[in-house]
Image (tube, grey):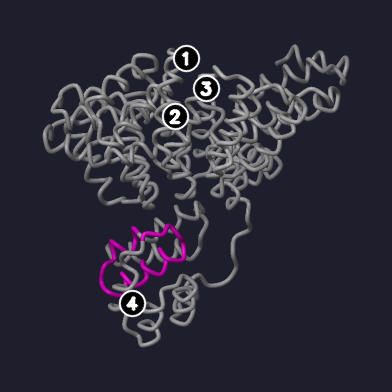
Amino acid sequence: MSDFEKALSLDPNNLWAHMGAGMALEMRRRFTRARAHFEAASKLAPKWAWPHVLRGVCLWYQAEFKRSISAFGLAVRLDPKGELPLLFSARAKADIRDSSLVQELDKALMLAPDSGFALSWRGRAMFVLTRLPEALDDLRRSCEVLPDYDRGWSWLGVSLIEQGKLQEAAPLLMKARALNAHYPTTLYPLAGALMTLGRWRQAGRVMKEAAYIDRSGVWIEHRISMSHPNPAALRSRADLDRFLNKSPRSAWAWAWRGQTQLLLQHYGKALGDLTRATLLDARDPWPRVWRGETLRRLGEWDAALDDFDAALKLDASLSWPYAGKGDCLLNLGRPKEALRLLDRSLKLQDFCGPAHALRGRALLALGRKTEADIAFATALELHPQDVWIKNLLKPRAQGDPASSFEIRRLAGDARELGLKDCAKSLDRGDASRALAACANDARREARLYRLRGWLKLRCGDAAGAAEDASRALDSTLDPTDEAALWLRHRARTVLQ
């Protein structure tokens, strides 16, 4: 990177230095700065498609799917004979469920009839669109044309599982696993198929592999604030429950289920599963990391610190426990200690947006605003779509947070959420019926959680109120939500 910077200092219009710097920054996940270099390159070489392709890739990683499609579209117009821009465009369209992606793949296959990538992607897309015979033909052909591409084998196997053809699917997924043992979306359905076929021991090994890879993807890469488990992991929950019924002393399985419960905001269930995992295996730091994170989200700062400390004694190279401890200390009014821990976390993993944002909060608390602004800018550069980080930049709301729980305002929130029966019960002063009317609503909205938490508190369920208040803080991904903080404090006061 330093060589590219030196080249640009000598010649700001050096096309290859801009491309090299952009690719180096992309590899370091500095996507915003990488895009700037690719944009400069596109101006220097206006008829070259690849600066737009690489800019589109950066936008895709930043979840700017429509803008990435636009960038890929421009590349397609500049290079109408190249299939790769079409493939990238189709991949981005898949993320916004745009069925026109099939047309992009059709065009790519006209340009490159033997493209295994295009065949496998089109096959899986057509399976989702329920065009089954064509889908399976494409997937089988992709495996013939590109036998070393694990996704082709994986998607063919998953498609057959969804048709109930387990005997045929299992060896295909085993082949995909042999080609790439680090793709959980292959491993989870393979484990489920093996269980159904009665191969429990092998299924357990495969699911354990998937769980260990998943912990790296979600937690080491620090997408903690997003609270989105791997969709394949969620689909395999029933298989995990079946495995635990068969092997109730599998510590890794309890730990993995506890992690999933945490990301789904089922904090009480997460604590139960993770505690069981720590009792079964005292050497694994991860259940303690996840239990510490659960307690942090519940506002149990001292208990969370204990778990993070226990995890670090087992493995001092884990970065998130330092960041989690930093947040706990911030909330306990100890910003100087918090900053030291957050710096340590970022030395271990410097592309963690939430840790940079928490560091910004610590610097603000110490009166170092200029440095705090830089920390927040870095956090947003790493994760520009992360609402949790954006909310940290907002000024705190003024006024009494208790006013958010006036009956009139709560009834208004219920009506805006479409909970008419709940609103009517609130108008009548019937908290019990109001709670029954919203108890099973699965939406992840802060207003819903605050409403339900307040109703639980009124009905005598202080523990449930504290958990829903914590969900409100997590659903907006806004740890400064004054109304939710007030509700959680009141619920915990009742519990004490």
Q: Mark 4 points at which residue?
A: 434
- In space, the residues marked 2 and 4 are separated at their CA atoms by 41 Å
Residue furthest out toward the front: 133
- In space, the residues marked 4 and 1 are separated at their CA atoms by 58 Å
Q: Compare residues 320 and 13 and report the one nearer the observer.
A: 13
Q: Give the range drawn in magenta.
A: 442-467
Residue type of the residue flagged with mark 3: Phe
Q: Compare residues 309 and 37 and report the one nearer the observer.
A: 37
Q: Which x, y percent locates residue 180? A: 39, 17
- In space, the residues marked 3 and 1 are separated at their CA atoms by 8 Å
Q: Quick one: label 2 or label 1, which is nearer the N terminus?
A: 1
Q: Mark 2 points at which residue?
A: 220
Quadrant of the image occupied by residue 489: bottom left
> Contact, CB < 8 Å: mark 3 with mark 4?
no
Q: Quick one: label 3 or label 1, which is nearer the N terminus?
A: 3
Q: Mark 1 points at which residue?
A: 146
For residue 141, above or below residue 265: above
Q: Please, what secondary structure does the residue beneath circle 1 have?
A: loop
Q: Quick one: label 4 or label 1, which is nearer the N terminus?
A: 1
